[in-house]
Every structure is written in structure tokens, then in C-alpha cells.
Amino acid sequence: MAFLFILPTWPIDVWTSAMRKVAPGLDVRAWPDAMGRLEDIEYCAAWLPPPGVVKSLPNLKVIMSLGAGVDAILKDPTLPDNIPIVRVNDPDLTGRMTEYIVLHVLMHHRQQRRLDENQKRRVWDSFPTHAAKHLSVGIMGMGVMGADSAERLRDLGFRVAGWSRSRKTIPGVESFAGESEFDAFLARTDVLVSLLPATADTDGIINRETIRKLSRKGPFGAPIVINAGRGRQQVAEDILAALDAGELHAATLDVFTTEPLPEDSPLWTHPKVTVTPHCAADSDPETICAYVAGNIAKHQRGEALDNLVDRARGY
Ligand code: NDP
Ligand code: OXD
């Protein structure tokens, strides 16, 4: 039995070394130069596999996404449809995402960018701040990551709500579910956070119409958007137009339709946009390899796989 990494855009040696360290008995192979006999490969872990590579493995038993999102795998039109896909769900990855969301909610809440500008110009302007309880944060996507961020933000005193397909019960966090409750969720939200997966239903969800439905009663008079889900969820032109029209106060964007974000994108230089390079939750190779190896061991013992993806839902 062999295991294959298919990571065209990641540093392959880092991943093969990490896997050999955490699972010394595993026959670790790497696409494209060290695949060996294709018939041996029963498990693969991938991020953006080139179309046809997964299909070329005749004895593959499980496809593992090296991310929490599986859109990078599902976009391969030749992907065999009878092989289970599992994704990463690990406290290390979740903790990193929560740090990012809390950091950016606080950055906007405490107006850190304004303070940075003032320091650059040597301006001593101690403007009034407001309490966390005056800011309503709304998280779209209340899965593993959304729920953890919601709890930490609640603990800091923010008014937190989540929106997902199914209703959630998290103490101190209001739950909205399904399309019928989307508008009510937006209407109470000053800071809109996306931790949704990329699916046909979530494509373009952060658009001008959505932005116009957000609350304007918050301390900044206009809402804020933070997208760490997927770039496909935001309509960049709508975000820029809403910022320029004063319908949006600020935006933090970690994900983009084209990554790396092209140098000529106006998002880079817009004074109200914070751009980060899809680093909200970075995958730590050894931690993620230990998780993947554990899932392989479970499968080999005949136990159920952890974090199986529902292909019909797309996440
Ligand atoms: P989960 O699958 O655990 O959660 C997804 C959540 O989204 C669920 O609550 C689900 O609802 C909800 N959802 C899905 N579709 C809809 C819809 N149409 N309407 C309303 N709610 C919907 O995923 P994770 O929390 O682990 O990860 C979320 C996403 O974060 C990933 O898919 C990935 O895109 C992104 N991500 C980004 C990273 C970065 O570095 N920027 C790193 C890691 C992840 P329900 O609970 O009802 O099923
Ligand atoms: C992920 C990601 O899905 O890195 O884990 O975006």
C-alpha cells in the first residue's frame, strides 16, 4: 500500500518529510516525479490536483483534501465519483482561523488602521472607542470554524449570531438558518464574516444587494465585511463600489477569485481594504500529516473515516 501527495502549488519536500516523520512505516510518494507503480497507491492527499491525476490511480480507496475546503479537489472534472473524499478538521487549523477572525474583528472594532495612520503622521488623536457589546458580528457558515470563532467573539462581549443551513445551539450565540432567515440575519449584522465553503449556493453571496441589507445602526454607521471563506463568495467590484459609496465601512479579504491576487487589482491599494494572502488558517505540515495518517489507519482497520465530505452538498 502506498500514499501519494498531489500538491502542484505547495512545497512537496516539506510535506513528504513531515509525513515520513509522523508515519515512518508509510510508503510516501509524490506527484509527479516519485509516483512509482500507480497500482500500489491506495490513498492520496491533494490540493488543486491537475485534472486526470487522481483518475489515473487504479486502486485508490480514499481522496484526502489537505484543506478544510474541498473545492480545490472537486473542481477536477475527471474526479472518480465512487471514491470517498475526506477533509481536514483539526484543532490546530481551527485555532488559527479563530485567531484571524478575532484579530480582524478587533482591528476594525478598535480602529487599528486609523491609529497606524495617525502614528505615521505623528498625530496624537485619542478618539472615543465603544464597547464590544455595541457591535453585532454575524458569521455565515457555522461549521467547525464558524462555531469556534463565534464562541471566542461572544466571550469577548460581542453580540454574535451565525447563519447556516441547519440551526445551531450555541449558548449566547443567536442562530439563523436557511435562505428564509438570511435577510433577518443581515439586518442585525454590523460585521459580516464569511466562513462558508465554496459551493454553487454560496458563489457571489457577498454582493451589493447583500451589503445593502446589512445593519447601518452600528458604531461606524456602515457595515464591515471579513471574508476568510473562499474568494468566489465575494463580488469584488460590488465591495469596491459599496466602499466608495459609503455603503460599506471597511473590508478584510483573505481569499480571492484569482490567487495570488493580481498585482493590478484595485483591492491592494484601496484605503478601506485589508488584503491578506490566503493565510487565515495555514496548514501545519506535521499536524496535518498526523491527522491524515490517523485517518488512513482508521480506514485500514475498517473503521469509519473522519470528516467525510458529502459530495451532493459540496462540503
Ligand atoms: P464546515 O463544513 O464545518 O462548515 C461549513 C458551514 O457552512 C456549515 O455550518 C454549513 O451549514 C454552512 N453552509 C454551507 N452551505 C451553506 C449555505 N448554502 N447556506 C448557509 N450555510 C451554509 O467547514 P469549516 O468550518 O471547516 O470550513 C469552512 C470554510 O472555511 C472551508 O470550506 C474553506 O472554504 C474555508 N477555509 C479557509 C481557510 C483560509 O485560510 N482562508 C482555511 C480553512 C478553511 P450546516 O452546518 O447547516 O451544514
Ligand atoms: C483550507 C484552506 O480550506 O487552506 O484549509 O483554505
Image: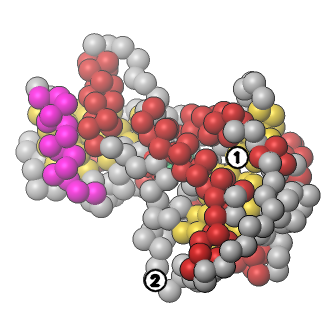
Q: Residues within 10 Å of mark 2 (few under 14, many from 20)?
A: few
Magenta region, residue range: 10-24
Residue 22 part of the magenta segment? yes
Q: Residue at x 80, y 48 (%)?
A: 131
Let me know if residue 208 appears in the view: no
155 with respect to 304 (left or right) = right
Quick one: SS at disc 2?
loop
105 with respect to 60 (left or right) = right
Viewer-nearest residue: 246 or 293: 246
**Image quadrant in which you'd find residue 171:** top right
Q: Position of residue 211 (x, y in %)?
A: 80, 64
**Image quadrant in which you'd find residue 91:** top left
| Mark closest to the chain's N terminus, 2 or 1 | 1
Task: Kindly identify which numbered label has been placed on residue 263.
Answer: 2
Q: Position of residue 289 (x, y in %)?
A: 27, 36
Let me know if residue 227 appears in the view: yes
Q: Residue at x 61, y 56 (%)?
A: 104
Quick one: SS at disc 1?
strand
Task: Kindly identify which numbered label has been placed on residue 155.
Answer: none
Residue at which label 1 appears: 140
Between the C-alphas of marks 2 and 1, the distance is: 29 Å
Does 40 sit above or below residue 108?
Answer: above
- Mark 1 near ligand 1 (CB under 8 Å)? yes
Q: Quadrant of the N terminus?
A: top left
313 with respect to 167 (left or right) = left
Does 31 sit above or below residue 2?
Answer: below
Instruction: Name the main secondary structure of what is drawn in magenta.
Output: helix
Amino acid type at circle 1 is Met
Q: Residue at x 32, y 13 (%)?
A: 302
